[in-house]
Image (spheres, coloured by chain):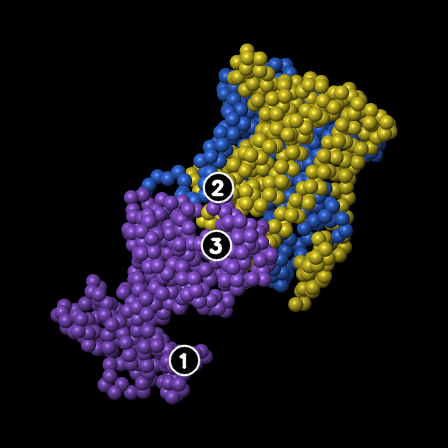
């Protein structure tokens, strides 16, 4: 294991930021910690870096089977990219990147020439060869981000930690940098942990996504797993848009509004409340019900501007419903506002309290 | 659009800047020029005339008389004592200011705001009272006075008392400049330095110090001006022994009370030059700080 | 909840710097100040009371606080005009003028004192023109007020400048669009916003004036009951080796400074909170 976190708890005053969290990360993996603000993701990252210490008596952190819980931050050999980069504003780009090399104890300090060579290499790696002499204030946000990354890599980190690395950038630069980070990771293959509240970013960049909420890990899996097989209602809601209906399960059937379908995972006689989640892209619209389980609804609004078409409908009980369909299908249907149609679910997830979630239809 | 037009003005550092002239929120020209006129007249009559008077009185009897004032060994002793006092008091408060700002701005702990208020106390104490409290400690009727006198150590009516009173009145200057600046700068850069392997001293010297150097200098300039010019506090503890415990301001007082006006204003003119140098340096440092703030803002702005 | 004196941080040097700060603060400030309180506690209540209610002492308090109040008021008015002109208008010499505002602060008080006395005395540059009108400045309460105005000016200007700079021009424009004339905008939009800063500057100038000694002692003439300020009275008590009497007068002055300081802090806290609540 490259990184191992065992049973860590962290409280700030009365606030419990992390509650008995454990996590294992393999060598070379790129893991995203995903969650809303206050979920504990940044605290966990800072504990990995040594910027915070876990509560007394709770578990510890180890890198490559070596316990580092009490190792000071400067000795841990971690690369940390701060949310606002924390570049030294009075130093040139070159000096920023050279900093970790220059502050080493004299015996381990590389020669002047060696430092120069290493900084140049790193500048090339982050594609900023020309800007070594400039100061942070003269760079664009994306460039600053890459300087911060190069500086973190100059430590030759055992683990690279990134705190909301794209948080302060605008959408287009963000998109570019994501792809670039992914390629960079393939090139240098350093174990990396990235904190983000942007699910799209986590799903796109990471090998593994750890979804956090209220100081706990809700789910830990590949991007595909967390998106398609959410382990909890929180994960379901947090990753992507959802349509939510409150219904019930009874004797192998699930029902809500005027829709009912088979649900063999609950064969019991006792009726139970359940919540049904359907993603907009897993719904389709038909003009007739054709005996398939479906939901009668009225078309409210159409928006075909985008890579798919979005249709907002209202069910008979007055709940809004969002459907996301390919443009081709949208054109083929030729819907008009006010039209009465049937919504068919290609997939739905049913959450019954105290029972593991199941994927249905 | 109708309310704003772009006018072009050159700012002093040679760069050009655009200024938006707002028609709605500007006074009519006559009102504007009246205000400017009042301000200029008031400030020159009120501030510039006294300054000019110092030099006029000093040179009243010509350059020879002016220069002769400095041949007095007591005047030279006063200058030496003033320099010595500042040379001890300013560095002492500099070290304190940096230490206080470091623990206050970079850490969260209980009682912090109380500590900040306590540091400001000397500004609220009047100069004469500042001198008096050291009398109460080290005077012959004070707590430690008799004990020290038995051992041949004299604090009051001697140089140590003057230095202590000066340290007291200049106590908050450096800390006051540094604390808000360092609080605003936060700890991210320092955390980054530590995470990159820098030691505590390396972090301070290479990351913190360059970020606070102008504010530090600013505090030093202000405390030096006050240290060299302090009158009330020093007057209480000095004992006015000519050639021994007279600082420059005290020497001015003695000469003035002896109706030796030329000599009094001659020594005063040196202090006035010190004040002018202080103003110039202070303004230059302010420009530097302004520049640093602008750069920091640009750096923080999202691109 | 675990009791923690300090939140964890990776930065070093907390113990060292806090320890040094507390030690230095205690030795230089707290210990000497406590001496003032202990020393005055040696006086009985009756002795203390008779010292501070002695007619000469009362006259000096009246003079000190009265002249300080008038000087701070003058500064509030002229300081506002100066700060407004320096912030809002561009004219030749503005930067120079801006720098000169700090002169009373940079000029040693004794120098200000003798310079003001020289100018406003009977034959001085300005005094000679006032003399025929029967206006005497030097060696009168008027001179004291003048000196206190001189040293207090930078406090009002420097406190007001940032507040005026931060003034949002768009609110003024909004007021204009909503039909307010310039005077209404000034009294209803600008003044309320900068009032905390103006009051803070006023209080700072007032506090500074109460304790002022060097610039006043030359121009005042130091006549008991007429032009003797409290600071000077402390010094004459000390010269008569009446330490207890000096301490009693000083304690009253110190406490009034602390009350003022607390008022300033409260004002700033209030202004900060109000500003915060708006954003």
Identify the image quadrant of residue C5. top left
Residue beneath the point at 54% across and 15% down: B148
Say which colour chain B has.
Answer: yellow
Work out whether B45 lies above or below B152: below
Residue labelled with disc 2? B200
Q: How many residues crowd around disc 2 within 10 Å: few (fewer than 14), some, or many (20 or more)?
A: some
Q: Assign a secondary structure to mark 1.
A: strand
Residue A142: assigned label = none
Q: Assign a secondary structure to mark 3.
A: loop
User: Residue B137: x percent and y percent?
Assistant: 54, 20
Residue labelled with disc 1? A309
Give me the C-alpha separation between circle 3 and circle 1.
46 Å
User: Which chain, by letter, is purple?
Assistant: A
Q: Which circle's residue, 3 or 1, is located before the other in the chain?
A: 3
Provide the chain ID for the residue under circle 2. B
Residue beneath the point at 82% across and 24% down: B68
Seen from the viewer's position, the closer of residues B85 and C93 is: B85
Q: Are marks 2 and 1 on the same chain?
A: no
Cβ atoms under marks 2 and 1 closer than 8 Å: no
Q: How many residues crowd around disc 3 within 10 Å: few (fewer than 14), some, or many (20 or more)?
A: many
Cβ atoms under marks 3 and 2 closer than 8 Å: no
User: Residue B291: x percent and y percent?
Assistant: 63, 51
User: Which chain, by letter, is blue?
Assistant: C
User: Residue B35: x percent and y percent?
Assistant: 74, 49
């Amino acid at each position: 294991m490259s990184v191992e976190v065992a049973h860590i708890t962290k409280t700030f005053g009365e606030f419990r930021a992390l509650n008995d969290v454990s996590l294992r990360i393999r060598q070379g993996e790129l893991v995203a910690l995903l969650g809303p603000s206050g979920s504990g993701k940044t605290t966990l990252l800072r504990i990995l870096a040594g910027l915070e210490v876990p509560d007394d008596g709770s578990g510890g952190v180890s890198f490559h089977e070596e316990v580092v819980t009490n190792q000071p931050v400067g000795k841990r050999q971690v690369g940390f990219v701060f949310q606002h980069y924390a570049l030294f504003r009075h130093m040139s780009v070159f000096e920023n990147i050279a900093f970790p090399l220059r502050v080493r104890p004299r015996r381990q300090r590389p020669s002047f020439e060696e430092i120069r060579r290493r900084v140049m290499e790193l500048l090339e790696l982050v594609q900023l060869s020309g800007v070594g002499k400039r100061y942070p204030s003269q760079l664009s946000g994306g460039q600053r981000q890459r300087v911060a990354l190069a500086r973190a890599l100059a430590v030759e980190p055992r683990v690279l930690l990134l705190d909301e690395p794209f948080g302060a950038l605008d959408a287009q630069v963000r998109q570019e940098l994501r792809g670039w980070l992914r390629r960079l990771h393939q090139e240098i293959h350093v174990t990396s942990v990235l904190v983000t509240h942007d699910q799209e970013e986590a799903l796109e960049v990471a090998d593994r996504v750890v979804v956090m909420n209220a100081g706990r890990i809700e789910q830990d899996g590949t991007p595909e797993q967390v998106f398609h097989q959410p382990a909890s209602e929180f994960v379901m809601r947090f990753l992507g848009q959802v349509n939510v209906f409150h219904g019930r399960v009874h004797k192998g059937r699930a029902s809500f509004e005027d829709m009912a379908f088979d649900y063999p995972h609950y064969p019991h006689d006792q009726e139970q409340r359940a919540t049904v989640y359907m993603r907009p892209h897993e719904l389709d619209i038909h003009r007739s019900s054709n005996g398939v389980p479906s939901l009668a609804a009225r078309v409210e609004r159409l928006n075909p501007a985008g890579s798919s078409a979005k249709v907002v409908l209202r069910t008979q009980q007055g709940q809004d419903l969002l459907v996301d369909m390919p443009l081709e299908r949208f054109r083929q249907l030729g819907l008009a506002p006010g039209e009465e149609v049937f919504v068919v679910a290609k997939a739905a997830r049913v959450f019954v309290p105290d029972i593991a979630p199941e994927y249905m239809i | 659009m109708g309310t704003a037009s772009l006018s072009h003005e050159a700012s002093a550092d040679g760069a050009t800047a655009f200024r938006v002239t707002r028609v709605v929120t500007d006074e009519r020209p006559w009102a504007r020029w009246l205000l400017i006129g009042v301000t200029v007249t008031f400030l020159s009559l009120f501030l510039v005339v006294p300054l000019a008077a110092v030099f006029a009185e000093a040179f009243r009897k010509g350059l020879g008389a002016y220069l002769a004032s400095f041949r007095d060994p007591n005047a030279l002793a006063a200058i030496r004592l003033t320099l010595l006092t500042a040379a001890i008091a300013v560095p002492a408060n500099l070290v304190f200011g940096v230490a206080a700002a470091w623990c206050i701005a970079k850490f969260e702990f209980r009682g912090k705001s109380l500590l900040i208020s306590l540091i400001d106390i000397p500004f609220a104490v009047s100069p004469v009272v500042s001198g008096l409290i050291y009398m109460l400690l080290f005077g012959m009727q004070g707590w430690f006075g008799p004990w020290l006198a038995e051992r041949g150590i004299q604090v009051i009516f001697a140089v140590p008392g003057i230095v202590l009173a000066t340290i007291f009145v200049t106590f908050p200057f450096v800390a006051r400049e540094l604390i808000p600046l360092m609080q605003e700068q936060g700890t991210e850069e320092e955390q980054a330095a530590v995470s990159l392997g820098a030691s505590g001293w390396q972090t301070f010297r290479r990351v913190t110090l360059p970020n606070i150097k102008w504010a530090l200098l600013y505090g030093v300039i202000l405390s030096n001006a006050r240290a060299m010019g302090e009158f009330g506090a020093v007057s209480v503890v000095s004992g006015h022994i000519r050639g021994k415990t007279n600082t420059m301001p005290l020497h001015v007082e003695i000469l003035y009370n002896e109706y030796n006006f030329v000599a009094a204003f001659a020594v005063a003119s040196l202090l006035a030059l010190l004040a002018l140098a202080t103003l110039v340096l202070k303004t230059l440092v302010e420009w530097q700080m302004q520049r640093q703030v602008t750069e920091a803002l640009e750096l923080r702005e999202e691109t | 909840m675990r009791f923690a004196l300090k939140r964890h941080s990776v930065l070093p040097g907390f113990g060292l710097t806090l320890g040094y700060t507390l030690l230095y603060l205690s030795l230089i400030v707290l210990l000497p100040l406590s001496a003032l309180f202990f020393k005055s506690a040696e006086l009985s209540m009756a002795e203390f009371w008779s010292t501070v209610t002695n007619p000469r002492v009362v006259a000096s308090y009246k003079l000190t606080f009265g002249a300080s109040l008038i000087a701070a008021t003058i500064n509030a008015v002229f300081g506002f005009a100066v700060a407004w002109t320096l912030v809002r208008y561009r004219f030749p010499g503005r930067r120079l003028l801006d720098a000169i505002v700090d002169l009373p602060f940079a000029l040693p008080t004794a120098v200000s004192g003798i310079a003001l006395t020289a100018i406003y005395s009977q034959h001085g540059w300005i005094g000679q023109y006032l003399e025929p009108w029967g206006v005497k400045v030097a060696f009168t309460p008027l001179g004291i007020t003048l000196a206190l105005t001189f040293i207090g000016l930078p406090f009002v200007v420097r406190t007001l400048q940032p507040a005026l700079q931060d003034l949002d021009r768009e609110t003024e424009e909004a007021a204009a669009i909503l039909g307010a004339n310039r005077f209404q905008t000034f009294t209803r939009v600008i003044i309320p916003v900068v009032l905390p800063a103006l009051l803070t500057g006023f209080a700072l100038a007032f506090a500074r004036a109460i304790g002022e000694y060097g610039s006043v002692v030359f121009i005042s003439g130091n006549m008991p009951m007429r032009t003797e300020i409290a600071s000077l009275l402390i010094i004459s008590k000390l010269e008569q080796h009446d330490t207890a009497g000096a301490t009693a007068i000083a304690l009253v002055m110190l406490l009034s400074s602390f009350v003022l300081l607390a008022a300033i802090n409260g004002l700033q806290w209030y202004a900060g909170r109000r500003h915060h609540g708006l954003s």
